Image: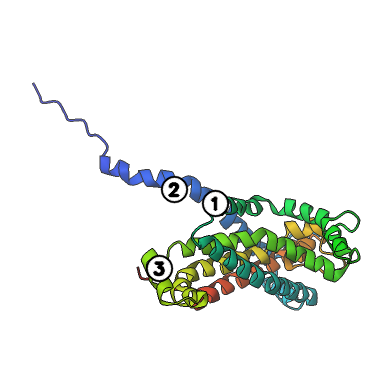
Amino acid sequence: MTAATPVRRPSRLAHNRWTPLWFLAPAVLTLFAIGIYPTIFAFLTSLRQYNLTRARDGFPFVGLDNYKAVLSDATFWETLGRTASFYLTVMPVEIALGMVIALMLHRPGWGFMRAAVRVSLVVPLATTYAVVGLIGRLIFNRDFGVANQFASWIGLQPLDWLGSQTGAFAAIAIMDIWQWTPFCALIFLAGLSMVPGEVEEAARLETSSHFALLRHVQLPYLLPGFTAVLILRSADILKLFDMVFTMTRGGPGAATELVSIYIQRVGFRIFDMGTASAQAILLLVVTIVLSRIFIKLFYKEIDQ
């Protein structure tokens, strides 16, 4: 009798080697479908004369002509400058208010009230941009808005918030501050929670100055979160569309036409997808450059 040939079984090590890849595959495919592929498609579109109103003429390759047209477009620079003004208006306020709220919640005491405030901070973040825009239209309505009701209580005349250029710009800034100040507060509160308790307690015994405590003890733990706030909020403001479009449609005139509103107008009203894609790619480059600058200036590793 001949000995039975042993049956070869798949290696357990090889099976375990492929297991993590199967778990990662859905996330990688999703990222490619909603992030990488649209970016590649937008870049390729920006190199073509991609006007949907002249689809019969085809989509010829034009190289960097779309980028040259964008860089020489005065309206594009005006909307980019208006976006920068909006950024410089809301970011300092959100960071300052978020820091104050985080420092107040970090102090001992308050008990249940502190927990309730932390939970309430999540409510604006859970509200979608479009809903925030609808809420803003109700708050700043000239006839029955809450803002004019408050103004009448202190003796001021009703204002046409959304009908004037200054009022509309102030209205979208206020709504953005309302929605994203809690985000800054929660990020800063997370940074404050990383400060060693014994170090902070010793510093409180050494000085009664809250500013000295913030500068010398708490600030190093706040810088990573501060950098994250700058990067994430910069990206959000540069692509802010839903809330502004719902509230003002970019008006009155062009008072609230941020760069994202202008890109939407070029792409989906004029149907010049090549130029709109070039604008979007340039906006992506601006976001990346700002992120690198913020990381270079503010981010520091903390040695535990």
Residue tagged 2: 24
> Could you tell me if the residues under marks 3 and 2 are in contact, i.e. CB atoms within 8 Å?
no
Mark 1, Cα crowd under 10 Å, few <14 / some 14-19 / many 20+, is few
Q: Which residue is drawn at 85% across and 55% down?
A: 145
Crowding at mark 2 (Cα within 10 Å: few <14, some 14-19, many 20+)? few
Secondary element at tag 1: helix
The furthest residue to the top: 1
Residue 72 left/right relative to 126: right
Q: What residue type is labelled 3?
A: Glu
Q: What percent of the width, then of the height, locates residue 249?
A: 82, 60
Q: What element carries label 2?
A: helix
In percent of width and height, residue 289 lies at 57, 74
The residue at 56%/57% (across/down) is 36
CA gap, disc 1 and disc 3: 22 Å
List x then y, in percent, for residue 164: 88, 68
Task: Measure the C-alpha gap from mark 3 to mark 2.
Answer: 44 Å
- Indicate left or right for 170 with 213 as reference: right
Q: Which residue type carries mark 2?
A: Leu
* Residue type at tag 1: Ala
Identify the residue under disc 1.
Answer: 115
